[in-house]
């Protein structure tokens, strides 16, 4: 908001100097092809931000929620947080000789991670709990940052944070420039995402919602700390997503973005008839599925994938007229380049 | 933030017209006497918002957390939410003949509410669960609003929302005008506070943290709803407050305001040596206890009170040099008048 505020001040000066809006304001969503997906996004944003439009929504109610894995960054050949957890198992194995004979650690240490991947998000959460309990919230944040600075994706050999989708970064910036508050609502760990979400996505920690383990307040030698416990607190998936949105935000979003059946309930909650204005005739909500269709530049998978399965959601999106992004044909570019970052994107949209 | 943004634009115009800052900008905290409490607040705010000051804190990290009961509004002779729960028991009694013989309902229906009050916050939470499960989140929000519109405090005969403290409203507005994000972190129910927190305190629902019962996502005749279940999700008191702050905000606050021992851990977490900048020599944090010392205009209670007991906290505040507000001598006015509301306060601070 600080950036928006500063940018608005700059825009105001420009307006006063030029006497009209800046003719060089860039077109939104430059990495999106001119297909229906882009048109539907822009039409929605224009409608809800135009005061005399029947679909107008006041700024405070412009809440947009985004899944993370497979929606904002890749999730193949395994959830990136699982790669982190496997690296932690290896790093901590010397202190845990019992892991050699205990699953799922045994499989990890023997290099057979596929068996864990097949178990999906639950196995990931369990592994995170087992490998990360006992440290403090601040220690864990430092571990995540250190890992991200070193780790490389097994296929692309790029840092994981460079495998975020450029078109989605533009979408986040475009929505924020139009008064939206953007939230992550992910099955991934809340404290795994927060250390880097602001730098990478421009989403501050207080707008990151995810799965969590329990923490406990303690005074250690008189210093208050929060210790991470090996106990699941909340699994933020499927029906858990609307529950968490209500718990954290206390408002129903007007826009939701996902890529799997795990996001379906979040999209249903956002795009149901009983939106913010129950008496409204106009539908003021927007739902979008990212469909992974690009096996050359990314991956192609949907109904039969262990990771990010999109089956029921694909049918419901079609029947309800939600926007379905065809990554191969809708996106000019998949990943953000090294040079692109969220600060530059904010610059790009300063005139919006 | 929208208000801040608009106000900033107005200020900018005024600046451009006058060529200097508005000489008629009001002094902050007008309902506070010129005592040390007021001086300490203003000194802190000036320090953390002045860029070349060693205590400077970037705007994104200016998080301030406020307890609600006894800190922002009164809590005597019983927590206001308990008054709500008792009224609900009476309203629903006809549908629950079994309550006549079952505690705590029996005591309520027989007019012996004191026995429940003595049990404190736990009893309140239990009563809320028992009387409010089964409805949807939207239905419950409407019930709370309807009650607040009708209910009167037994002693003052005023609506409960007029028993908020004028000096604290000014403090909230003053902090926000200086780039702080203000949060409620209360033992009270999160969905009891959210329907009115924005109108009364200028705090939007996404910045309200409280105790909660579990909710469940359901499709009812194809329409997604969240049903409130008779099961405690989280009790936001004592050590739970730092846990919830970490869960919801993901940042350590730099300012914390409370009135009871239930707030002590939140104040310890905020004002411990390991603040946001662990290597910082300067203490960039601020902790304040509201001490109820005014038996004429409000109530006087501390170490021996069933409600809002302030015992350990009072000792720790003294030993650590936290600010202790003496309501009787620090505040010119206790309650907000009918005519004062948060919109007017924002107007008051538009030049800050």
Image (spheres, coloured by chain):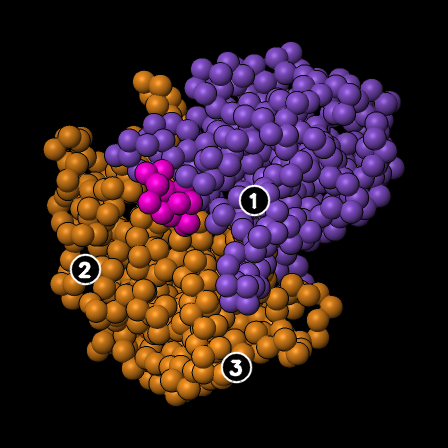
Chain colours: A orange, B purple
Say which chain tag 2 marks.
A
From mark 2 to mark 1, how far is it between C-alphas? Answer: 43 Å
Q: Residue B228, position in %: x, y?
A: 64, 45
Closer to the camera in the image, A319 or B331: B331
Q: How crowded is mark 3: few (under 14 residues within 10 Å), some or many (20 or more)?
A: few
Q: Residues within 10 Å of mark 1 (few under 14, many from 20)?
A: many
Q: Are marks 3 and 2 in contact (CB under 8 Å)?
A: no
Same subunit, labels 3 and 2: the answer reads yes
Q: Quadrant of the N terminus of chain B?
A: bottom right
From mark 3 to mark 2, how far is it between C-alphas? Answer: 35 Å
Q: How crowded is mark 2: few (under 14 residues within 10 Å), some or many (20 or more)?
A: some
Q: Residue A242, position in %: x, y?
A: 53, 55
Label 1 sits on residue: B174
Residue A191 in view, yes or no? no
**Residue A43 got which mark?**
3
Q: Give, as a single range, the part of the protein colored magenta.
A: B48-61
Mark 3 or 2 closer to N-term?
3
Residue B282 in view, yes or no? yes
Q: Is mark 2 on a helix, strand or loop?
A: loop
Q: Are marks 2 and 1 in contact (CB under 8 Å)?
A: no
Label 2 sits on residue: A159
């Amino acid at each position: 908001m600080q950036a928006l505020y500063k940018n608005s001040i700059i825009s105001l000066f420009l307006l006063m100097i030029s006497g009209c809006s800046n003719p060089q304001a860039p077109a939104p969503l430059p990495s999106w092809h001119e297909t229906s997906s882009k048109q539907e996004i822009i039409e929605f944003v224009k409608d809800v931000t135009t005061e005399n439009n029947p679909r107008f929504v006041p700024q405070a109610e412009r809440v947009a929620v985004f899944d993370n894995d497979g929606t904002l960054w890749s999730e193949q050949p395994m959830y990136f947080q699982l790669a982190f957890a496997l690296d932690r198992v290896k790093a901590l194995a010397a202190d845990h000789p019992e892991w050699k004979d205990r699953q799922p650690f045994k499989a990890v240490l023997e290099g057979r991670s596929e068996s864990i991947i097949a178990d999906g998000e639950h196995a990931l959460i369990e592994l995170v709990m087992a490998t990360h309990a006992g440290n403090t919230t601040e220690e864990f944040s430092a571990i995540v940052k250190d890992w991200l600075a070193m780790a490389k994706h097994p296929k692309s050999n790029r840092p994981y944070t460079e495998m975020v989708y450029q078109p989605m970064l533009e979408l986040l910036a475009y929505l924020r420039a139009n008064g939206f508050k953007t939230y992550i609502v992910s099955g991934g760990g809340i404290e795994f995402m927060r250390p880097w979400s602001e730098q990478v996505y421009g989403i501050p920690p207080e707008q990151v919602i995810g799965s969590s383990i329990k923490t406990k307040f303690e005074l250690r030698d008189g210093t208050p700390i929060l210790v991470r416990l090996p106990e699941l607190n909340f699994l933020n998936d499927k029906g858990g997503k609307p529950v968490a949105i209500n718990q954290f935000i206390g408002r129903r979003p007007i826009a939701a973005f996902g890529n799997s059946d795990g996001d379906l309930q979040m999209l249903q909650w956002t795009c149901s008839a009983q939106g913010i204005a129950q008496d409204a005739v106009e539908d003021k909500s927007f739902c979008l599925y990212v469909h992974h269709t690009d096996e050359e530049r990314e991956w192609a998978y949907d109904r039969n994938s262990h990771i990010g399965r999109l089956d029921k959601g694909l049918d419901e999106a079609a029947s309800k007229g939600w926007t379905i992004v065809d990554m191969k044909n809708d996106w000019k570019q998949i990943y953000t380049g090294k040079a692109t970052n969220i600060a530059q994107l904010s610059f790009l949209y300063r005139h919006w």
